[in-house]
Image (spheres, grey):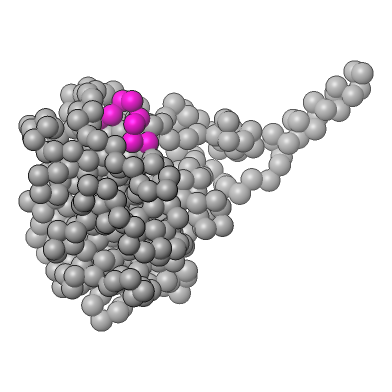
Amino acid sequence: MKKAFLAVFALGLGYLTLWPVPLTPEVYEPLRAPAFTGDFESNDAMAALELVLLPDAAVGPEDLAVMPDGTVYTTDLAGKLYRIDGEVPELIEDLGGRPLGLKAGPDGALYIADSYRGILRWTGPGRLETLVSEVAGAPLIYANQLDIARDGTIYFSNSTDRFDPELLGGTKPTSVMTVWEQSNSGYVARRLPDGTVEKIADGFVYTNGIALSQAEDFLLINETGRARVHKLWLTGDKAGERELFLGNLPGYPDNLERQGDGTFWLAFASPRLPSEKLMPYPFLRKVTWRLGDLVRPAPVHRGMVIQFDENGNILRNLQDPSGRFGVTTSALQVGAQFYVMSLDGRGFGRGMVADLPPPQ
């Protein structure tokens, strides 16, 4: 019996310490996460929003796009496109793939960052074309969000070059793996109006939301894995330079949306996790990964979005401690209504702007 126990113990120990894992953790010593105080004071402002369900128990309305005629679109986990500015969501077309970022272009088309297929352009049912499927000779394997300049230049993020979400069970497990590894394989690129595609910034730990400034002189970039936002100058004497814009945030930033008045909305996918204490210890992170889903880090359902101006001043902080909307991914005011989107929820939040706390 003793020998059998020792044999089982040795096998277990060998598995936890030697079994191959797909990630190679990098040493990272994060700053202590700020508390929900001050600009990030805990509240339940999102209680004013209705949970609008997608049809047929669909999940994952990650982002939204507002078209020139006021039509609002979203997509789901299965790649279906919906119109959502009516009382109930209306299925428009099954696009396939896994669409994440959505944006209306100056030409009236809907542009899509599809995490499986790259950058797409949709001009109506049955009319979907691929614009970018590779960058610098390598496949674009994890397109995440995009923004489009007035001249038609498409800026987009690629969350990682290390892990392909189509092969690893989707974007949610792939995002966890990328952040847990802490490899800086994310980047931002752009497609010029003549079709030229070029990287403009790299070295990010899970690049996520991006948004252009009102004057299009800089681009904001969410780095989810480091809980911060960067500013990349696009024009002027500082063109090509990168600055820290918002650092050591209380959650992991997901999408960024331009409101169109010089302010932005940022959604947090989750509060910062206690598992960050293991970030300085790559070996322990490998052991944790071998223990499986019950032990691996995972997003916490606690919704939070903030609005801020081009100087980084926090104007509004809206939260949902109940987690009713799942992993919150995007937020935007559309006329008199306010939307909050979700990575894994059965629907999205929608309510009247007048029912929300006013800007500070």
State which region is magenta. 319-326
Q: Which residue is located at x 7 percent, y 51 percent? A: 261
Position of residue 188 measured from the top left corner of the image (x, y, whole percent): 33, 60
Residue that sits furthest to the top in the current view: 2
Q: Which residue is located at x 50 percent, y 55 percent? A: 165
Q: In this rendering, is residue 6 above or below 160?
A: above
Q: In this rendering, is residue 177 above or below 111?
A: above
Write down the quadrant of residue 234 in the picture.
Answer: bottom left
Magenta segment main secondary structure: loop
| 80 or 121: nearer the viewer | 80
Q: Does 334 sit left or right of 88 as displayed?
A: left
Is residue 237 visible in the rendered image? The answer is: no
Q: Which residue is located at x 86 percent, y 28 percent? A: 7
Position of residue 129 measured from the top left corner of the image (x, y, whole percent): 36, 75
Q: Does 342 sit left or right of 36 as displayed?
A: right
Q: Which residue is located at x 8 percent, y 35 percent? A: 354
Write down the quadrant of residue 327 in the picture.
Answer: top left
Position of residue 9 measured from the top left corner of the image (x, y, whole percent): 80, 26
Check residue 298 for magenta coloring.
no
Q: In this rendering, is residue 66 above or below 127?
A: above
| 157 or 284: nearer the viewer | 157
Is residue 37 visible in the rendered image? The answer is: yes
